[in-house]
Image (cartoon, rainbow, N blue to C red):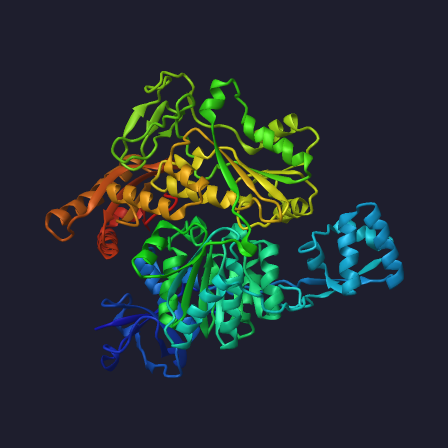
């Protein structure tokens, strides 16, 4: 006898509530997960719409208490049913519970508070305003100039437009009010999160390369055969223009689109391009919105009020009923991988949702992930190339500075002599400089400053991580050795980890260039609300000469006056203790270099490194993605890493160190027995070993790595382990999580 677990009212806040119903025999062969059904509910057995989330063979309640499904709802599959079916796929592919998967795809209903709408109105006469404009121009009051120019063109503008796109601060607006030039009108805001007064722009004019991509993809849609596409375009090649044109063409067909953007790239500068083209038919989601605001935007999408939803990976689950396109910009970004259970990847989930709804998927990047490019090479994605920048602007010239040589000449500064020389030159020319500290993935690797030697695991070919107990550890296999004080290659005693941060760099830069106006962007300076936008706006308005920061300053920003980018520590992402080191380094360096020379002046990039001969750094300097892909793929094939092999990581966490270790060893033994019995063939297993951080909040963590050429084999391993854990009560006090093809690790 079969039973179905059914959700009754998914709009209710308690999305965890699941009811069980008996499946009548006539429906046993027809019913499947995600289907809409009509079921008797409540004391009066009122027929109510429900959604099947799981089919099981055993009853969870007394048989006499279980009611029977009345029938399958033939009124059509709703978008909720489609998302529930997708949640079941996520749970199957990535592990976790069905409730965790449902919380991922279905927004919890919360009422949004009222928002105030503010509009700037020009009070002064046109002649008086023009007179003040001339006065402000003479005094170089650039923010006031921008504000008056906008109001002379359009006497009423949204407050958010002034503070966002025009980069006018609240203090400037208050000063204009005090002079009697403008007034701020206040009223209740509409549910839309975009300024409705923004005029629409005409369709952008695409160059030949861009137009060919758009036409090829649209032809597939017209034939009813949309697929998955990868657009590999160099930095500044106009990928966003292609995205907008594709969305516009599909909107004309009555299709809706989801645009996924890494959270760090959700800048007003990017969003305003979509607003101009699509007006009120576009909305956004981001982490700074309240749950109520997010829920309201989901409801607008469900009611058909939107054509486009833009946001981070959670926007993938926008309830569009006529979805035509899912677009992932900067598809290589690690933020597309969930760090909470279920640890799904937005790329694979987008492809699955598109397959279920007959939509297309477009991935775009100047530095595609190894997985995506490998699939494109294998024909799973259709590959398009944008090989030139718009208006034929040249790519920046890159040069590599060997910090080992700097040390030999006596320069122990964070800034190499060559970089100091170029900064001096740009400051004289009134041009801007970006200084990028490559800190992503910093995990305490140890290297020699004299020769560049990095201490690596002899079994896994990843760098050893430095621990406070005087040990260096590999977090894949557990290999350990004592931290050395002298380099075994050259004998140098300059053996340590890199310790400089953005604050130290800011101090050094201000001491070396006291006349320069310096801004710093990091976690501390962006902690306040709008701190991120304020710093970028100030730099964009040329209120600073040098901007110092980590990866957040090199993601998708367009600063026409930046002609020099200095990359201060290329090695920090190169030696991260996992196999993504070279890939992450190539991506970050290429993206950072792409910020230079986007205006009229040619750009230059200086890459400072202790490993100048490494192929990831050499090929990033040449902007040669194809050569990097081939060399990195050879390394991955040799070491059986993704995308050649697939990887599953299992985390076992317990408050009792000994008990957690025993549980991890038991699970490893069960898999080993399955391998020996031939149930799983050609499986590579590593561990159990300590996690990269072995103890967090009094939980001791162990990890086991499994590698196999076939993804489905790893899913079977996960399923078998989940079943084994569910049958043994000993695991009640142990947390077990799974992560497929990890990007950051546990």
Residue furthest to the left in view is: 677
Whether residue 698 can be seen here: no
Is 340 drawn above or below residue 301 in the view shown?
A: above
Give 173 or 147, whichever is nearer the viewer: 147
Against 14, residue 620 (above or below) is above
Residue 331's spot in the image, x, y percent? 43, 54
Which percent across, then down, holds residue 228?
38, 64
When asked about the image quadrant of residue 57, the answer is bottom left
The number of callouts visible is 0
Q: Position of residue 476 (x, y in %)?
A: 29, 37
The residue lying toward the viewer, choosing from 175 and 542, is 542
For image coordinates 51% across by 43% down, the residue present is 592
- The residue lying toward the viewer, choosing from 63 and 605, is 605
Q: Quadrant of the N terminus?
A: bottom left
Residue 108: % across, % down: 49, 63
User: In this rendering, does residue 550 appear at all?
Assistant: yes
| Depth check, front residue: 503 or 581 | 581
Which residue lies at the image location 43% right of the left edge and 62% below the top edge? 362
């Amino acid at each position: 006898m079969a039973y179905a677990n059914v959700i009754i009212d998914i709009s209710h806040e308690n999305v965890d509530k699941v009811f069980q119903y008996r499946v009548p025999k006539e429906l046993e062969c027809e019913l499947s997960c995600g289907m809409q059904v009509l079921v008797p509910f409540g004391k009066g057995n009122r027929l109510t719409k429900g959604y099947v989330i799981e089919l099981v063979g055993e009853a969870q309640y007394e048989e006499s208490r279980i009611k029977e499904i009345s029938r399958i709802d033939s009124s059509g599959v709703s978008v909720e049913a489609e998302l529930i079916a997708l949640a079941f796929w996520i749970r199957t592919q990535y592990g976790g519970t069905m409730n965790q998967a449902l919380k991922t795809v279905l927004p919890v209903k919360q009422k949004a508070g009222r928002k105030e709408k503010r509009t700037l109105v020009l009070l002064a006469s046109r002649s008086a305003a023009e007179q003040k404009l001339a006065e402000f121009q003479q005094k170089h009051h650039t923010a006031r100039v921008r504000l008056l120019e906008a109001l002379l063109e359009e006497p009423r503008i949204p407050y958010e437009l002034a503070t966002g796109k025009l980069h006018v601060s609240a203090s400037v607006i208050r000063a204009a009010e005090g002079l009697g030039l403008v007034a701020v009108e206040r009223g209740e805001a509409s549910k839309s999160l975009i300024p409705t007064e923004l005029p629409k722009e005409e369709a952008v004019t695409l160059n030949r390369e861009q137009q060919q991509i758009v036409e090829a993809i649209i032809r597939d849609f017209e034939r009813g055969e949309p697929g998955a596409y990868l657009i590999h375009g160099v930095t500044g090649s106009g990928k966003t223009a292609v995205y907008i044109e594709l969305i516009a063409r599909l909107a004309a067909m009555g299709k809706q689109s989801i645009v996924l953007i890494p959270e760090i790239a959700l800048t007003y500068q990017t969003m305003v391009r979509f607003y101009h083209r699509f007006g009120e038919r576009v909305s956004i989601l981001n982490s700074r919105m309240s749950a109520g605001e997010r829920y309201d935007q989901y409801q607008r999408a469900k009611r058909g009020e939107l054509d486009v939803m833009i946001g981070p990976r959670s926007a993938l689950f926008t309830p569009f009923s006529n979805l035509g396109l899912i677009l992932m910009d900067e598809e290589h970004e690690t933020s597309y991988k969930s760090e909470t259970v279920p640890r799904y990847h937005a790329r694979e989930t987008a492809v699955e949702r598109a397959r279920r709804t007959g939509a297309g998927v477009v991935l775009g990047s100047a530095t595609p992930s190894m997985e995506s490019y490998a699939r494109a090479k294998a024909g799973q994605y259709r590959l398009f190339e944008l090989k030139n920048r718009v208006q034929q602007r040249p790519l920046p010239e890159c040069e590599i500075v060997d910090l080992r040589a700097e040390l030999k000449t006596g320069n122990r500064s964070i800034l190499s002599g060559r970089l100091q020389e170029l900064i001096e030159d740009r400051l004289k020319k009134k041009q801007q400089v970006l200084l990028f500290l490559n800190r992503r993935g910093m995990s305490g690797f140890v290297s020699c400053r004299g020769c560049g030697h990095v201490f690596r695991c002899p079994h896994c070919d990843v760098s050893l991580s430095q621990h406070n107990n005087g040990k260096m550890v590999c977090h894949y296999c557990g290999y350990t050795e004592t931290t050395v004080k002298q380099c075994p290659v050259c004998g140098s005693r300059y053996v340590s980890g890199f310790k400089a941060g953005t604050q130290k760099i800011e101090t050094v830069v201000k001491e070396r260039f006291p006349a320069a106006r310096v801004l710093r962007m990091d976690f501390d300076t962006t902690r306040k609300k709008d701190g991120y936008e304020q710093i970028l706006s100030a730099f964009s308005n040329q209120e600073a000469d040098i901007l110092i920061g980590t990866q957040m300053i090199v993601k998708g920003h367009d600063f026409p006056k930046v002609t020099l980018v200095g990359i201060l520590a290329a090695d920090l992402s190169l030696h991260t203790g996992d196999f993504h080191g070279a890939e992450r380094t190539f991506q970050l360096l290429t993206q950072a270099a792409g910020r230079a020379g986007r205006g009229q002046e040619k750009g230059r990039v200086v890459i400072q490194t202790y490993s100048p001969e490494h192929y990831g750094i050499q090929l990033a300097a040449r902007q040669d993605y194809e050569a990097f892909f081939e060399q990195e793929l050879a390394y991955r094939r040799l070491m059986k890493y993704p995308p050649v092999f697939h990887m599953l990581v299992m985390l076992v966490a317990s408050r009792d160190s000994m008990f957690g270790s025993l549980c991890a060893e038991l699970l490893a033994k069960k898999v080993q027995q399955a391998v020996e019995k031939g149930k799983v063939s050609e499986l590579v297993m590593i561990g159990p070993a300590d996690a990269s951080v072995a103890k967090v909040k009094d939980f001791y963590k162990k990890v086991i790595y499994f590698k196999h050429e076939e993804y489905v084999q790893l899913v079977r391993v996960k399923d078998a382990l989940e079943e084994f854990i569910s049958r043994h009560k000993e695991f009640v006090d142990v947390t077990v999580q799974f992560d497929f093809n990890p990007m950051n690790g546990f």
